Amino acid sequence: MTTGRYLLVGIRVALTVEVRVSRRVPRLRAPLALALGAALALPLTPPATAADTYTLTPLKFTVRAGGRTCTVDADLYRPAGVDRDHPAPAVLGTNGFGGSKSDGSTDTTGKAFAQRGYVSLVYSGLGFGRSGCLVSLDDPDVDGAAASQLVDFLGGKRAADDGTTADFVTRDAPGDPRVGMIGGSYGGAVQLATAAVDHRLDALVPMITWNDLAYSLAPNNAAGGTGVPGVFKWQWTNGFYLIGEGQPLLQPALDPSRINSLACLHFVTEACRTVHTLNSGSYPADRTAELLAFARRVSPASYLHRVDTPTLLVQGQADTLFNLNEATATYRALKAQGTPVKMIWQSWGHSGGLNGPASGELDLSQGNLETSYVGRRVLAWFDRHLRGRTHVDTGPAFAYYRDWITDPERTYATASRLPAVGRTLYLSGDGRLVSRRDEVTPGSRRYTNWLTPTSHSESSLSGLIGLPDSPPRDTKGTYLDWTSEPLERHLDVVGAPRATLKVVSPKAERSQHSADAADKLVLFAKLYDVAPDGTRTLVRRLVAPVRVPDVTKSFTVTLPGIVHRYQAGHRLRFVIAASDDAYFGNRGIKPVTVISGSRNAGELRLPVAGS
């Protein structure tokens, strides 16, 4: 597999994708188009609604970021009545990837919080809109440093380029403003990057964002596989890459600070080299080490130990780009080190839009925070940490949306912690999923991959440009499945299922010690819901790509987290497939056999709510 096989070329294509994406804000970027649930009874003051309740001032800031000097384009929203003698706390926000301060959800952020009495500063992230510098994937030393200079402005330590100052923001100390950040996706990770380099931040609300880009773009869901490059998620990665490379040409004049080279137009060099390596389909040790080092350096996973700002994480269940496991990893890291943190799993993410008013979900682009569960949680978080209202209840440690509940006032369930594994099923040799090990029938089953993909979970690029997707499918002979008996009662799976597997693959074993990690065996694990009429549903279209670290040993696969009710009468189906057309696959033909016996049966472990 080469770059030319999948990477669409030409800025013309990039611009086409960008224009269409800009018309689907809730689908792609959705930085603040919250999928919001039912009302939460919190004592909040309703917002003013008149447009003249705030003033809007466009500003430019010259910043130094990543060794370059560039301009940040921003808008300052100042509530009526807020001045030096009557200061107010501030909210800082920026766009998702490919957006700007003027997109439908980012500018609404400024308005929405200004109407609720907050000074709001929204800006176009570096390399986007009319802000300069290269796209550096929310690097703390670049994007975090730039945002920190905007915090300087809010704290009165610097002026905008036109001399505007902000002496009307509440301060905890000279130069230290009371400020929170909010945003989604690309505008979510930058919050953690900023908090890692600037401890003046008082509250964060990162939404639908990543923990580790190495996992996001080339996931390896096998335990012990962190040193092995995962399976390249080529559709998502190349779609965003083209959008990023086309950014400078969307502006009326070229900004030299936004141009790297002809080989890497608009990204930092390390980002381009990472994408080129992934597209090459060849992962020798030196290039693998470079790839992983860069991806993790710009990921919260590498710098969360420096984040002490109270954080409310909001992640989407319908998200094949940044799945629930990303937020869970961030949540656990922050909690373990004592950083105040809570987490909400809303319904939608990058892979699914809002469910509509009947579900109780609302869009923040309408400014309706008070009438939505997540919106009220955000306001309570800022009330507590920015306005100092210590009596305000910021909600439970964990909440999750349930799409099987039709009453909008009950769609969110709450818990003090994530559910633990509550049910174990065994992979029988005859293709059944059984409840007890002694029910396992000894036997072996085999599949063989083709040189072309034979399974389909999703078309990420179709979503990017607004085209319909085809149903998930698997080709006979290229996958194995295990199916349970019809359930006697409902089963609510909340969290990341885990499967322990042992496979036999002589051809993969012969290439086990190759100097190129691409020679290792690749497979895809996933969960279906099978209705009584035989209709199969791939839960949230999520799959768990695995590049098996050592094919001679058993391994554990952590599937993406889900919130799913298996209805009574339905059956669970666990599948391992040879390929998936949203990812790169095996190099060469590698037949796989799974042998099951009472002592060596594979296991599927499910986190079950209420267990």
Image: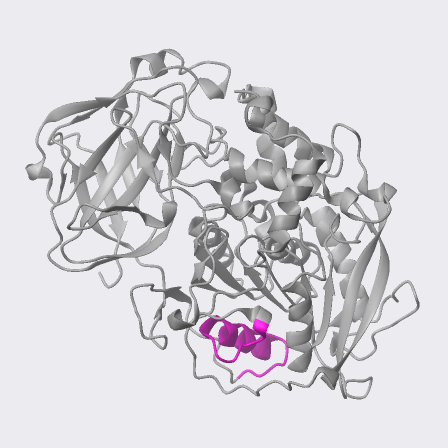
Which residue is painted at 81% across and 38% down in the image?
259
Which residue is painted at 87% across and 72% down in the image?
165
Q: Total marks drawn?
A: 0
The single residue placed furthest to the right in the displayed view is 163
Residue 391 in the image: state x and y as whole percent: 51, 85
Front one among 115 and 294: 115
What sort of colour scheme is used for the picture? one colour
Front one among 592 and 384: 592
Residue 515 in the image: state x and y as whole percent: 50, 14
Q: Is residue 22 above or below residue 180?
A: above
- Looking at the rendering, in which quadrant would you find the C terminus? bottom left
Front one among 178 and 430: 430
Q: Quadrant of residue 593?
A: top left
Judge from the rendering whether residue 50 lies leftward or rightward of residue 174; answer left or right.
left
Would residue 231 be visible to someone looking at this image?
yes
Judge from the rendering whether residue 471 lies leftward or rightward of residue 171; answer left or right.
left
Q: Which residues are magenta?
A: 366-390
Which residue is painted at 14% across and 59% down in the image?
489
Front one among 349 and 469: 469
Residue 208 in the image: state x and y as whole percent: 52, 56
Would residue 186 be visible to someone looking at this image?
no
Say if the magenta span includes residue 325: no
Say if the magenta span includes residue 380: yes
Residue 211 in the image: state x and y as whole percent: 53, 48
Q: Is residue 553 above or below residue 602?
A: above
Judge from the rendering whether residue 265 lies leftward or rightward of residue 323; answer left or right.
right
